[in-house]
Image: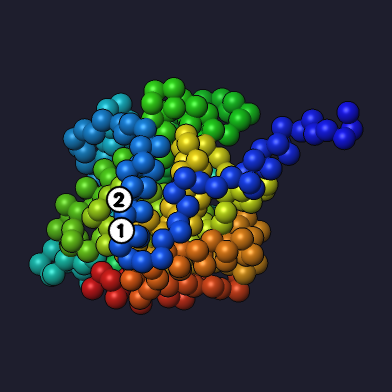
Amino acid sequence: MSFRNLSPQVMFEQMALSHTPRFKFEAETRDEFEAWKRAARPAVRQCLGDFPPRCALNPQLLAEWEHDGLRKQKWLIDVQPGLSATLLVNIPEGVHEDQPPRPAILCWHGHGPFGKEPVMGNDSSPDLRQTIDCHNYNYGHQMAKAGFVTFAIDWIGCGERNDTRKPQHRAGPGRDWCNLYYLHATMLGMTSISINVSHGMAATDFAASLPFVDETRLGVMGLSGGGTMTLWSAHCDRRFKAAEIICYSDLWAHFGYRHLNYCGMQVAPGLFKLVDLPDLQGLLAPLPLLVDLGVYDTCFIIDTAMACYRRVENIYRVAGASDRLELDLHPGEHGWGGNRSVAFFEKHLG
């Protein structure tokens, strides 16, 4: 018996390593790329399942204040029947309603206890300041300082939409809310991704309605799990003209199956049957895409992260869009490089 495998984990790792997705990119010409994209993109989109119904936003301004030269607002909006979200908006200095509207960027947060707060510049406690310092995490604040309007909401299960926090006060189940919500969603024919993307669309609807935002110049960016949300938001919402995926590049067989570095908010039924992560990123072409990789990232290891990027690079090359793909390879851990972001979004959002 010792010569046979009894470990289901080993079984899954071996299955993943030997698996070839149905739509693995093998095209060599632009016409072949277009045919691949036409076939793969609808099939991949179907993996997300149904999207929740939309509803009127019913926006309510909760507070407005000044912080580090920025005007900041906190809003409450309805994102689907029976569920709301708080939304933060960072407004650059000198922006007024009688001036030409600015480009805006949806800033998705990653995993962690604080949701959108550190991303948008909340440094009001030692723990928040440490989180920002550790991941260069306040890109929603820094990009607003650079002149972009930025906005953010929490995914379900994070920040103010975490069921263990006030005002919910539900007892923690001792399990990951990401995985529990995924189970809930798939039982109803949805996924956590489809729910979160839909809520991001609602947030974008609201941001685009603000008088100082140019709805034709919208971008999206996010770190880690926020990179997941950036990827899917760019796929599902054609209003985004450029995207920055920060430290979410790797190969499913390695970061998912081998390292167990994924959860219910990152996956969809049958997704890996169709594509690997570089294929999924490459399907964005020719959308302008900036990819951040940390040389010392301990979540997405640099060897397989670079293998992912090289495959995306090849897809953009075959698509005739090499000039729309950029890499910020920074000497840091799991975090935002911030070296090319301002110039990238200025170039593609105007």
247 with respect to 55 (left or right)? right
**Colour theme:** rainbow
Query: Where is residue 335 drawn, in percent x and y?
Result: 55, 63
Examine the rendering and report whether any part of residue 126 can be seen. Answer: no
Q: Looking at the picture, tell me which residue is in the foreground, 111 or 15.
A: 15
Q: Is residue 218 above or below residue 209?
A: below
Q: Quadrant of residue 16?
A: top right
Q: Is residue 216 above or below residue 76?
A: below
**Residue 38: image tag:** 2
List the residue tagged with mark 1: 34
Instruction: Identify which residue is drawn at 44% across, 22% down.
Output: 187
Instruction: Identify which residue is drawn at 59% across, 26% down.
Output: 173
Examine the rendering and report whether any part of residue 281 can be seen. Answer: yes
In the current view of this chain or complex, which residue is farthest to the top? 187
Q: Are marks 1 and 2 in contact (CB under 8 Å)?
A: yes
Query: Where is residue 144 drawn, in percent x and y?
Result: 34, 67
Q: Is residue 167 above or below residue 267?
A: above
61 with respect to 88 (left or right)? left
Query: Where is residue 119 drawn, in percent x and y?
Result: 44, 57
**Residue 145: image tag:** none
Query: Where is residue 181 drawn, in percent x and y?
Result: 48, 30
How crowded pointer 2 is (Cα within 10 Å; few <14, some 14-19, many 20+) is rated as few
56 with respect to 261 (left or right)? left
Q: Quadrant of residue 326?
A: bottom left
Q: Amino acid at mark 1?
A: Glu
Tell me the SS state at disc 2: helix
Q: Looking at the picture, tell me which residue is in the foreground, 2 or 144.
A: 2
Q: Quadrant of residue 260?
A: top right
Spatial CA span between label 1 and label 2: 6 Å
- Considering the image in quadrants, where does the C terminus appear? bottom left
Tell me the SS state at disc 1: helix
Q: Amino acid at mark 2?
A: Arg
